Image: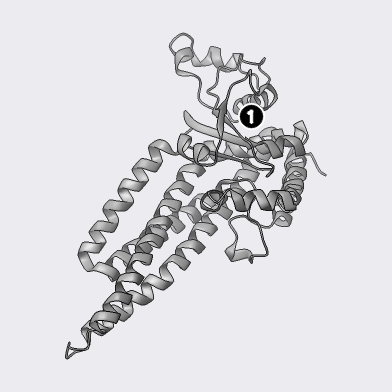
Amino acid sequence: MYGLRTMFLVVLMAGLMMVVGLAVAGEIGLIIMAVIALGINLYSYYNSHSMVPKMMGGQLVTAQEAPDLYRIVEQAACQAEMPFKPELLSQFTVEHLEARCTGHCRPGDCPRHIPSVYLIDTPIPNAFATGRHPNHSAVAATTGILGLLTRRELAGVMAHELAHVTNRDTLWSTIVASMAMVISFVAMLAQWALFMAFLFGGMGGRDDNGGGAGHLAGALIVAIIAPFIAMLIQMAVSRQRELKADDTGSRRCGDPEALAYALMKLEQGVRTPESRYAAEEMKTAEAANHMFIVNPLAGGAGKFFSTHPPTEQRVERLRKIGEEIGRPF
């Protein structure tokens, strides 16, 4: 269900991007948009696991530098059944490694691949995951979330983030964000170009059939509306993937209650004056806020204008999952 909805929305976004190119510059624009989209998606595909954490000011940490956080991520990787480390696969059989990984491995002894762990020095309590593949992935947590949540709640959050990795949600979100960026950028340029054409060349009134005026007017309408539609599609994709990660992560860790309490704490945490000020200062958060477990720039936006489902909806779904797995709360 979640996968089909996401695929439909991504195809819709790609179609919108093509329409923008066709409306603004005809067939040439269509080809240019396709090439730009392909280039951006390929770059994002191969670099998202390091590009986004660094963009957010994250610092790569080791098990020695952040032992508690690293240990929680390590346990979440076991629960998520991340791929085994390539160097171990060359020495041992899969059966041996599966027997060795019980989900409660000793610190530093997990045979599975552990995502790169980043720490972001900000009071905003949040976390996110990114990367094209489980073997090329990263998770990031802020100093704010480490100070706000209990260890159990943080484990629920990391189970959610690793679910994004194994569900390939970060790849989908990167693709959609890239296309939305192209649409917005080209639409902005088109608006300026059309304004200048109108200012210095009229609306093409010399064309007896009015074709010039019609084309310019149509292109202007598309340039104005397309970014808005792209934003709605991007937000819809984000909401679907958040619900899926809640479901997958809470079932894996077997503790939907911990994730529910974490979400409620985080929603309040990002609304404090200190967090809001930090979010405004960190302008890059706006470009990647759909990747966080809760929106760091949360406000009073309606359902269709939010990158995340309402926390009440997420908690209610987690309550139902708790009942299904025999862990009611």
Residue 163, position as x, y percentages in the image: 58, 38
Q: Nearer the viewer, residue 314 or 118?
A: 118
User: Most extreme residue toward the right, as rendered?
Assistant: 329
SS under mark 1? helix
Image location of residue 111, percent across then percent down: 56, 17
The quadrant holding residue 27 is bottom left
Q: Left of 201 or right of it: where is 279?
A: right
At 63% from the left edge and 17% from the top edge, which residue is drawn?
Answer: 64
Residue 246 vs residue 158, the one in the foreground: 158
**According to the image, label 1 marks what residue?**
76
- The amino acid on which the numbered mark 1 sits, given as a three-letter code, is Ala
Task: Tell me what residue is drawn at x 37 percent, y 70 percent.
Answer: 223
Name the foreground residue: 205 vs 85.
Answer: 205
**As drawn, 68 above or below 51:** above
Q: Is residue 325 visible?
A: no
Relative to residue 27, is residue 11 drawn left or right?
right
